[in-house]
Image: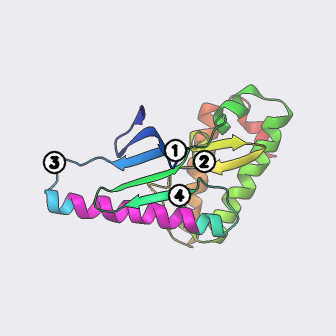
Protein backbone atom coordinates (compact mmCIF):
# COMPACT_ATOMS: atom_id res chain seq x y z
CA UNK A 1 0.00 0.00 0.00
CA UNK A 2 1.41 3.39 -1.02
CA UNK A 3 1.98 5.57 2.05
CA UNK A 4 3.62 8.57 0.43
CA UNK A 5 5.07 9.64 -2.87
CA UNK A 6 7.67 12.37 -2.79
CA UNK A 7 9.95 13.97 -5.34
CA UNK A 8 12.74 11.48 -4.61
CA UNK A 9 11.08 8.30 -3.35
CA UNK A 10 7.96 6.26 -2.80
CA UNK A 11 7.13 4.73 0.57
CA UNK A 12 5.01 1.61 0.69
CA UNK A 13 3.66 -0.23 3.72
CA UNK A 14 4.67 -3.89 3.55
CA UNK A 15 5.87 -6.82 5.66
CA UNK A 16 9.30 -8.34 6.08
CA UNK A 17 9.41 -11.85 7.52
CA UNK A 18 6.02 -11.23 9.12
CA UNK A 19 6.98 -7.88 10.64
CA UNK A 20 5.37 -4.55 9.71
CA UNK A 21 7.77 -2.74 7.40
CA UNK A 22 8.20 0.17 5.02
CA UNK A 23 9.74 -0.20 1.57
CA UNK A 24 11.42 2.95 0.30
CA UNK A 25 12.26 3.06 -3.40
CA UNK A 26 14.04 5.94 -5.08
CA UNK A 27 12.09 6.85 -8.18
CA UNK A 28 13.85 7.08 -11.55
CA UNK A 29 14.21 10.56 -13.02
CA UNK A 30 13.28 10.38 -16.69
CA UNK A 31 15.00 13.69 -17.46
CA UNK A 32 18.39 12.12 -16.61
CA UNK A 33 20.41 9.74 -18.70
CA UNK A 34 19.41 6.34 -17.29
CA UNK A 35 23.00 5.23 -16.60
CA UNK A 36 23.63 8.40 -14.61
CA UNK A 37 20.27 8.16 -12.84
CA UNK A 38 20.80 4.52 -11.86
CA UNK A 39 24.20 5.34 -10.37
CA UNK A 40 22.86 8.33 -8.45
CA UNK A 41 19.91 6.40 -7.04
CA UNK A 42 22.17 3.51 -5.96
CA UNK A 43 24.66 5.91 -4.39
CA UNK A 44 21.96 7.78 -2.48
CA UNK A 45 20.26 4.64 -1.18
CA UNK A 46 23.66 3.32 -0.05
CA UNK A 47 24.39 6.62 1.71
CA UNK A 48 21.00 6.59 3.42
CA UNK A 49 21.59 3.06 4.73
CA UNK A 50 25.08 4.00 5.91
CA UNK A 51 23.80 7.11 7.70
CA UNK A 52 21.09 5.09 9.44
CA UNK A 53 23.70 2.59 10.65
CA UNK A 54 26.05 5.34 11.84
CA UNK A 55 23.20 7.20 13.55
CA UNK A 56 22.26 4.02 15.42
CA UNK A 57 25.90 3.55 16.45
CA UNK A 58 25.86 7.15 17.77
CA UNK A 59 22.89 6.37 20.03
CA UNK A 60 20.14 7.77 17.80
CA UNK A 61 16.94 5.76 17.42
CA UNK A 62 16.32 4.92 13.76
CA UNK A 63 14.18 2.24 12.09
CA UNK A 64 15.80 -1.18 11.90
CA UNK A 65 17.11 -1.73 8.39
CA UNK A 66 15.92 -5.12 7.09
CA UNK A 67 17.08 -5.16 3.47
CA UNK A 68 19.01 -3.10 0.93
CA UNK A 69 18.53 -3.59 -2.81
CA UNK A 70 21.17 -1.49 -4.57
CA UNK A 71 20.10 -2.61 -8.05
CA UNK A 72 16.53 -1.51 -7.32
CA UNK A 73 17.66 1.51 -5.27
CA UNK A 74 15.41 0.53 -2.39
CA UNK A 75 15.43 -0.17 1.34
CA UNK A 76 13.10 -2.18 3.53
CA UNK A 77 12.99 -1.04 7.14
CA UNK A 78 10.99 -1.37 10.30
CA UNK A 79 7.62 0.39 10.38
CA UNK A 80 7.76 2.76 13.34
CA UNK A 81 4.32 3.29 14.82
CA UNK A 82 3.60 6.55 16.58
CA UNK A 83 2.80 10.20 16.02
CA UNK A 84 5.25 12.49 14.29
CA UNK A 85 7.07 15.00 16.46
CA UNK A 86 5.06 17.62 14.56
CA UNK A 87 1.81 16.13 15.87
CA UNK A 88 3.17 15.91 19.43
CA UNK A 89 4.46 19.50 19.41
CA UNK A 90 1.20 20.80 17.94
CA UNK A 91 -0.76 19.22 20.81
CA UNK A 92 1.41 20.94 23.42
CA UNK A 93 1.57 19.81 27.02
CA UNK A 94 4.32 18.05 28.98
CA UNK A 95 5.04 15.47 26.24
CA UNK A 96 5.68 18.32 23.78
CA UNK A 97 8.30 19.86 26.06
CA UNK A 98 9.99 16.50 26.61
CA UNK A 99 9.92 15.84 22.87
CA UNK A 100 11.49 19.22 22.09
CA UNK A 101 14.34 18.50 24.51
CA UNK A 102 14.78 15.01 23.07
CA UNK A 103 14.97 16.49 19.55
CA UNK A 104 17.86 18.68 20.74
CA UNK A 105 19.68 15.69 22.22
CA UNK A 106 19.16 13.58 19.09
CA UNK A 107 20.38 16.30 16.74
CA UNK A 108 23.40 16.81 18.99
CA UNK A 109 24.25 13.10 18.75
CA UNK A 110 23.92 13.18 14.96
CA UNK A 111 26.15 16.22 14.62
CA UNK A 112 28.79 14.89 17.04
CA UNK A 113 28.94 11.80 14.80
CA UNK A 114 29.49 14.02 11.75
CA UNK A 115 26.04 13.26 10.33
CA UNK A 116 24.02 16.01 8.70
CA UNK A 117 20.39 14.93 8.26
CA UNK A 118 19.63 17.32 5.42
CA UNK A 119 15.87 17.45 6.09
CA UNK A 120 15.50 18.10 9.81
CA UNK A 121 11.77 18.62 10.09
CA UNK A 122 9.44 17.43 12.81
CA UNK A 123 7.65 15.38 10.14
CA UNK A 124 10.83 13.27 9.84
CA UNK A 125 10.74 12.35 13.53
CA UNK A 126 8.41 9.79 15.06
CA UNK A 127 7.76 9.69 18.79
CA UNK A 128 7.66 6.14 20.13
CA UNK A 129 7.58 5.48 23.87
CA UNK A 130 8.89 8.99 24.57
CA UNK A 131 11.86 8.55 22.24
CA UNK A 132 12.40 10.46 19.01
CA UNK A 133 13.02 8.08 16.11
CA UNK A 134 14.71 9.79 13.17
CA UNK A 135 13.54 8.84 9.69
CA UNK A 136 14.34 9.83 6.10
CA UNK A 137 18.09 10.30 5.82
CA UNK A 138 17.69 10.53 2.04
CA UNK A 139 19.09 14.07 1.81
CA UNK A 140 21.74 13.52 4.48
CA UNK A 141 25.47 13.22 4.34
CA UNK A 142 28.70 13.08 6.30
CA UNK A 143 30.07 16.49 7.16
CA UNK A 144 31.54 17.46 10.51
CA UNK A 145 31.91 21.10 9.47
CA UNK A 146 30.24 23.93 11.35
CA UNK A 147 28.56 25.32 8.26
CA UNK A 148 26.80 22.05 7.38
CA UNK A 149 25.64 21.58 10.97
CA UNK A 150 24.55 25.22 11.07
CA UNK A 151 22.46 24.79 7.93
CA UNK A 152 20.86 21.68 9.45
CA UNK A 153 20.01 23.61 12.63
CA UNK A 154 18.80 26.66 10.72
CA UNK A 155 16.39 24.51 8.69
CA UNK A 156 15.13 22.85 11.87
CA UNK A 157 14.56 26.19 13.57
CA UNK A 158 12.84 27.70 10.52
CA UNK A 159 10.62 24.63 10.24
CA UNK A 160 9.70 24.82 13.91
CA UNK A 161 8.89 28.51 13.80
CA UNK A 162 6.82 28.25 10.62
CA UNK A 163 4.96 25.04 11.51
CA UNK A 164 4.44 25.30 15.27
CA UNK A 165 2.67 28.14 17.03
CA UNK A 166 4.36 27.27 20.34
CA UNK A 167 7.86 27.01 18.83
CA UNK A 168 9.40 29.98 20.65
CA UNK A 169 8.77 28.22 23.97
CA UNK A 170 11.04 25.38 22.82
CA UNK A 171 14.09 27.65 22.40
CA UNK A 172 14.66 28.59 26.02
Q: Is the magenta region chiefly helix, strand or loop? A: helix
Q: Which residue is mark 2?
A: 156
Q: Which residue is mark 3?
A: 31
Residues at marks 2 and 3 touching, judged by CB atoms closer than 8 Å: no
As for residue 69 lying within the magenta part, the answer is no
User: Which residues make up the magenta segment?
Assistant: 37-53
- Pick the front one: 99 or 73: 73
Name the spot of residue 105 as percent of width and height, x first: 75, 57
CA–CA distance in space, label 3 to label 4: 30 Å
User: Given this view, does label 2 or label 3 mark the residue nearer the observer?
Assistant: 3
Mark number, residue 21: 1
Q: Secondary structure at mark 3?
A: loop
As for residue 38 lying within the magenta part, the answer is yes
Nearer the N terminus, badge 3 or badge 4?
3
Q: 8 left or right of 52?
A: left
Q: Which residue is mark 4?
A: 65
Q: 126 left or right of 6?
A: right
Q: Residue furthest right?
A: 94
Mark number, residue 72: none
Amino acid sequence: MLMRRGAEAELRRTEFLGRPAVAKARVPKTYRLSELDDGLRRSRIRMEARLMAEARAAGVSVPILYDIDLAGASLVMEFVDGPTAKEVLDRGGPLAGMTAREIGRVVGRLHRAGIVHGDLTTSNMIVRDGQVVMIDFGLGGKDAGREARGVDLHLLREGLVSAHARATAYFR
